[in-house]
Amino acid sequence: CALFIKAIMPLDNMDLMMKLLEKHSPLQVYTCSVSLHTTPAAHVTTTKMLQQVKKVAKRWRGDAPDVVEKDEQATGTLYLFGVDKPGQLTQITDMLRHHNVMVLYLRVQSGGPSQDKSDFAPLLGGPLAENRIRIIYDEAQVDEAKLRDEVQRVGRKVGYAVTCLITDSQSQLRAWLPSYLLRRKAFTVAYSIASTTMPPRSASTPRQLPRRRPRSALLTAP
């Protein structure tokens, strides 16, 4: 399940909130989106707000406080598709954190094969899942090619057969998304065929017991 909670708090308290969530429920996956509801003159500017968020993320990751910050921030979307399994997103977010990539928010969609379209269709509690994760990172500290390889490696390890990373600078080319959709459709069709040909797990062939001869047939005439 997914829970969305909206809270109003000072930016300085966000660090404490993330630490408390991680301490009391470490098996869950948390993301935090920050929005500005007041005018910049009354509160802070958008640039200052983003700088504060970056500082909180650094402290949460355990980075050194004296690391020089870069202003060249890149954003993108990570697409993950495959068989839904528990604990997948935890390993994905751990990998992103290891590569200094911050999760802005994520969207989880469960579903299954659609017989009409031969493609993935939303379905509550379905066996397949498509996750879209918005990320932000420092271009000077992250190797995008290496990050793509790591996303594919960890994704396949946890059950995501199809992965795709699209940065916002590449989104205008529209070269990665069509390939992802075609691979998603191919996997969905293959999964549907495999599901229909495999015997049900609950069905089992009853064991044939040896037939016993009637008791009367064992008696011989005097």
Image (tube, rainbow, N blue to C red):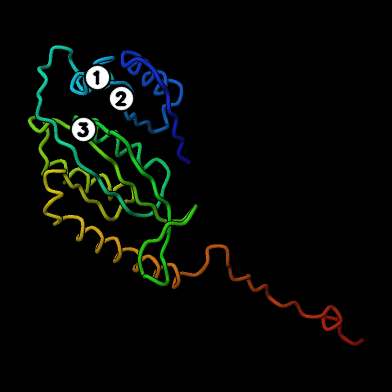
Looking at marks 3 and 2 on the same chain, the residue that comes earlier in the sequence is marked by: 2
**Amino acid type assigned to the residue bearing label 2 in the image:** Leu
Mark identifier at residue 165: none
Disc 3 or disc 1, which is closer to the eye?
A: 1
* Residue 173, x across and y down, in percent: 11, 54
Kind of element beneath mark 3: strand
10 Å crowding of disc 2: few (<14), some (14-19), many (20+): few
Mark identifier at residue 101: 3
* Residue 99, x across and y down, in percent: 18, 32
Looking at marks 3 and 1 on the same chain, the residue that comes earlier in the sequence is marked by: 1
| Label pair 3/2, CB-CB below 8 angstroms | no
Mark identifier at residue 36: 2
* Residue 42, x across and y down, in percent: 28, 14
Q: 143 or 212, which lies in front? A: 143
State whether residue 59 is above or below residue 135. Answer: above
Question: Seen in the image, is 32 located left or right of residue 212?
Answer: left
The residue sitting at 44% across, 67% down in the picture is 195
Kind of element beneath mark 2: loop
Hey, which residue is sitting farthest left in the picture?
A: 140
Kind of element beneath mark 1: loop
Q: CA distance from mark 2 to mark 1?
A: 8 Å
Query: What residue would you read off at disc 1?
Result: 40
**Amino acid type assigned to the residue bearing label 1 in the image:** Pro
The residue sitting at 31% across, 63% down in the picture is 187
Question: Seen in the image, is 4 located left or right of residue 48?
Answer: right
| Label pair 2/1, CB-CB below 8 angstroms | yes
